[in-house]
Image: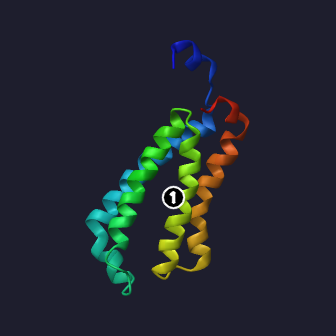
Amino acid sequence: MDNQENTTKKRGGCITAFLIFMFVINPLLALYYIFAGDMVRDSFPGLPGWAIPALIVFCLINLGLAIAIWQWKKIGIYGLWVSAVLVMGINLSIGLSPIQSFMGLLGPLIITLLVRRKWADFE
């Protein structure tokens, strides 16, 4: 993409703020799962052994998807929805309530609503 194309795309303050939030929270969550995974396991005694590593991977995937959205890639939005649905399944399987599990869909919903007027700018 050349500079002329970049200058015509305006992200807007809310989209920028939400993406920066994603750039910060996803690595922090991954670090939390890495360093406090035992506390999470203690809180959910039936937690399968694969759940913490899977959640770490999804945090890193979500960071990559946020970068894709920053770069005006539709795959970032679609991928965020897929990721959120899969994580919702993990959350349900570890014993979180359906309401807590569905809360994970708020991120993709918010970013989708924020970018809807900019959708034509996405590749």
Residue drawn at x 45%, y 80% as measured from the top left:
94
Residue at figure coordinates x 32%, y 66% from the top left:
53
Circle 1: residue type: Ser
Label 1 environment density (alpha carbons within 10 Å; few <14, some 14–19, many ≥20): many
Residue extending furthest toward the top: 4
Q: Which x, y percent locates residue 71?
A: 51, 32
Q: Position of residue 113 (x, y in %)?
A: 70, 47
Left/right placement of residue 102 relative to residue 83 reads: right
Instruction: From the viewer's perspective, tell me whether residue 14 is left or right of residue 34.
Output: right
Dot 1: what SS? helix
73 relative position to 35: left or right:
right
| Front residue (pair 7, 119) | 119
Q: Which residue is mark 1?
A: 83
Indicate left or right for 27 with 80 as reference: left
Q: Is residue 94 above or below residue 22?
A: below
Instruction: Classify 58 as above or below 8.
Output: below
Q: Quadrant of the C terminus?
A: top right
Coloring applied to the structure: rainbow
Residue extending farthest right: 117
Which image quadrant for residue 121? top right
Labels in figure, total:
1
Q: Position of residue 51 (x, y in %)?
A: 37, 72
Relative image position of residue 16 (x, y in whole percent) = 56, 36
Residue at position x 51%, y 65% from top?
A: 86
Vertical position of residue 2 compared to residue 54: above or below? above
Q: Nearer the viewer, residue 104 or 48?
A: 48
Displayed quadrant of residue 122: top right
Residue plotted at (68% across, 36% down): 119
Q: Residue furthest bottom?
A: 45
Residue 11 visible in the current orientation: yes
- Residue 18: tell me if it is visible: no
